[in-house]
Image (cartoon, rainbow, N blue to C red):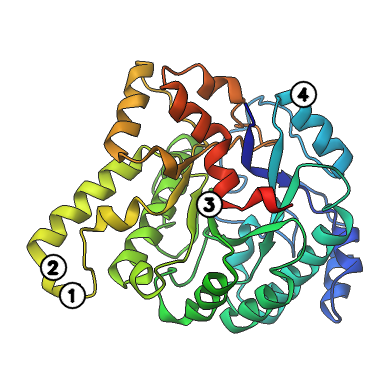
Amino acid sequence: MRIVDVDVHVNEDVGELARYCEMPWKRALLASKAATARYLDVPGLSPPTADDYCDPLFPSPAYREVKTPQQMRKDLDELGIHDGVLFPDHLLKLAIFPQPEYAMALAKAYNRMLINDWLGKEDGLHGALCIAPQDPKGSAEEIVELGKTKNIVCVYLPVAGLQRLYGQREYDPIYEVAQKLDIPLVLHGVSAVHPVFPFQLEQYPNLFSRHGLAHPLGMIANLTHMIATGVPVRFPKLKVCFAEGAISWVPWIMMRLDKEYIERRREVPFLEERPSHYIRKFRFATQPIEEPERPSHYVKLLEIIDNPDCILFASDWPHHDFDHPSKLMGYPIPEEWKRKIMGENAVRFFNLDKW
């Protein structure tokens, strides 16, 4: 079985990133190089949020990071993973930066570092092009310039701390070029407390609750906004995937929006089908794989979603809460579905065989 992991993470070395960064922002990165690095927290690269350093410190699994393609290939081999789609670490918080020029400079530097230092160095490593939502026009130009680069298989859209949700028409230039180039978009979340919807989670007393809500709420908010503003209608061939939000929220939002559609379809006259029709055309990555009381309940989730082609395996390696492929393989999922979820769906969605 060919296992494709649609979410593994490159740890961006600040010095290496600075090599590809434009002035004057290069100076800022070089200044950040002297900062003490913590998990997804380097000043000027991955900004701290309101939930950092406010919880009791307990012993936890060691912080892992992958800094070379050789190490990534070795790690994935040990996990039995054939292909991995690479996403950044620190730039998971890219949407929080208030300065569009700096955010765009970071995205461009990361993309060139990824292409020159990572892709093509080891077999089976594919890249997600990073964009800055603060600058949709510049992001669209970046996709046009680099979207056809060998082993670039998708575009990463950051979700955490996003100022304006992805249904806004200001993002249409990104969607237009992504649809034209047939390159998928992957909305990727991360835990954050920030004063924008839906990340105002400061009332929750611990990471247990904030982390439990941040990822799926970020996915739900953006998917609903995209449906409510007709993104899948305006761009019918656009490929969209939601990563690091798992899948248990998907049946709920399908049924909830279908209910609203029946009662209020005149508010969304551009939707020619129920929202669930469009949602089943999206893709959803498995990580973090939920822990059902009975394994059969996970299968029930897949049955309700009613499209095994839209589920993609993701591990989130090397983060502390990564999922080993054996976890999903151990669930009583029909063998045909299992082969699709573990690899075949991703091969088709990301056009991996062309490389």
**Which mark lies nearer to you, 2 or 3?**
2
The residue identified by callout 1 is: 269
* Residue that carries the numbered disc 4 in the rendered image: 78
Q: Quadrant of the N terminus?
A: top right
Mark 2 vs mark 1, CA separation in Å: 6 Å
Helix or strand or loop: what does disc 3 sit on?
Answer: loop
Q: Which of marks 2 and 3 is nearer the N terminus?
A: 3
* Label 3 neighbour load within 10 Å: few <14, some 14-19, many 20+: many
Return the residue at label 2. 265
Check contact, mark 2 vs mark 3: CB within 8 A.
no
Where in the figure is residue 171, as x and y percent of width and height? 49, 77
Q: Which of marks 4 and 2 is nearer the N terminus?
A: 4
Which numbered disc, 1 or 4, marks the residue that appears first in the sequence? 4
Q: Distance between the residues labelled 4 and 2?
A: 50 Å
Please, what secondary structure does the residue beneath circle 1 have?
loop
Q: Is mark 2 on a helix, strand or loop?
A: helix
- Contact, CB < 8 Å: mark 2 with mark 1? yes
How far from the left and from the top, in percent, is residue 340? Answer: 50, 34
Q: How far apart are marks 2 and 3 (CA)?
A: 30 Å
Q: What amino acid is labelled 3 in the image?
A: Gly
The residue singled out by tag 3 in the image is 189
Mark 1 and mark 3: span between their CA atoms?
30 Å
